[in-house]
Image: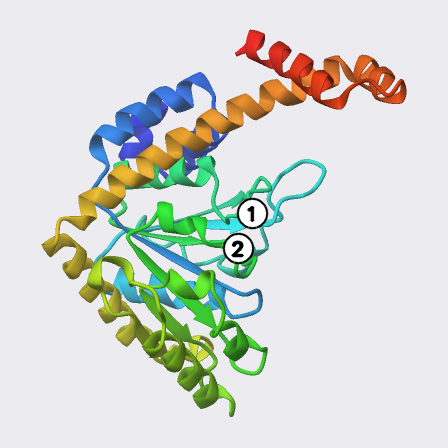
Amino acid sequence: MLLEKALAGEELAISRLLTKIEYFTQEGLESLQELIKRSGKAHVIGITGSPGAGKSTLISELISEYVRRGHRVGVILIDPSSPFSMGSFMGNRIRMVGKEVSGNVFIRSIASRGNLGGISSEALMLIEALDGLGFDRIIVETVGAGQTDTDVVYGVHTIAVVSVPGTGDEIQALKAGIMEIGDVYIVNKADKVEAEMLYDAIRFALDTAEVNFRDGWTPKIIKTIAIKGVGIKELVDVFEEHLSFIKERGLFEKRIRERRMKMIELMLRRKVDEVITMIVKENSDYISEQINEKHNLLNLINEVYNKVKEKL
């Protein structure tokens, strides 16, 4: 049985099982149900930030550090979707080839499916699956859309926001959105001359922020040079510190419950979207005709909406 082989750590079986889950097959969803019974143990870390900040290189180094510490690491890389097939371009996966060692690492690229918040129902389903398969550290890299990449807050325990000097991120640090969700702020490529300016801008933004940080945790700022492995050990130490903080306050389990609620919500939205797309396609000639005849738009929308309700 595929699930049994995946639980035994067979990489090909894990890959096939995750594909079945991602595409909502009956076997996939039945397996996910079993895996959810085993999940709820992994520390899930979200890595977000602007494109070009070096997130993939950073994650590659995090994998190595976690494996050195004896952990099994699952990685979900949310890539931009093809506008035609909605599939992943898989660029991040290519950059990490060679990191899957000794069955302790599994890397999966999936498409964002057009989710502007940076996370999809598929991503949350795969987090649950990898957790149930025994990966105790799960890293989720979002698509890197910038300030709108904030839905990752619903899927992870710890959020790290990666910034890079010399690209205007010091201005972003003064803005709302992505700069309000981080538990850890990372200044990557810290050997650049502008690094201190970016560090100071983030520190100023955090010190003067008129927001309540998540659950009383004071966000940390860490400097890294991912391409040289500098600062990675210190970064993992901070992640572990944050893990202890949320466990002591009962927040670890709370965030798992929130993740599962968000997963169900997004799964339902996907099913509803499929029905809407089907109804609009089936009635495209009629809709076009009514619009051209200056039919009352509100009446037309209600008419189509009623067809959608009949199918739900």
Question: Which quadrant holds residue 12?
Answer: top left
Q: Residues within 10 Å of mark 1 (few under 14, many from 20)?
A: some
Q: Amino acid at mark 1?
A: Leu
Which is nearer the eye, 38 or 212?
212
The residue wearing badge 1 is 116
Q: CA distance from mark 1 to mark 2?
A: 7 Å
Question: Which quadrant holds residue 92?
Answer: bottom right
Compared to 154, does 289 lie above or below? above
Q: Amino acid at mark 2?
A: Thr
**Secondary structure under the numbered disc 2 in the rendered image:** loop
Give percent across and percent down for residue 225: 43, 80
Q: Residue at x 27, y 51 (%)?
A: 72
Give percent across and percent down for residue 213: 29, 63
- Is 307 displayed left or right of 70 in the figure? right
Q: Residue at x 60, y 42 (%)?
A: 114
Q: Residues within 10 Å of mark 2 (few under 14, many from 20)?
A: some
**Secondary structure under the numbered disc 1 in the rendered image:** loop
- Residue at the farthest top position: 310
Give percent across and percent down for residue 235: 30, 72
Task: Kindly tell me whether residue 102 is visible in this rendering.
Answer: yes
Quadrant of the rendering where the N terminus is positioned: top left
- Is 72 displayed left or right of 206 in the figure? left
Question: Which quadrant holds residue 16?
Answer: top left
Q: Residue at x 48, y 80 (%)?
A: 189
Is there a contact, CB below 8 Å, between mark 1 and mark 2? yes
Q: Which of the numbered marks, if any, corresponds to residue 148?
A: 2
Task: Kindly tell me whether residue 76 is visible in this rendering.
Answer: no
Q: Which of the numbered marks, if any, corresponds to residue 297?
A: none
- Residue at the farthest right position: 293
Which is nearer the eye, 50 or 56?
50
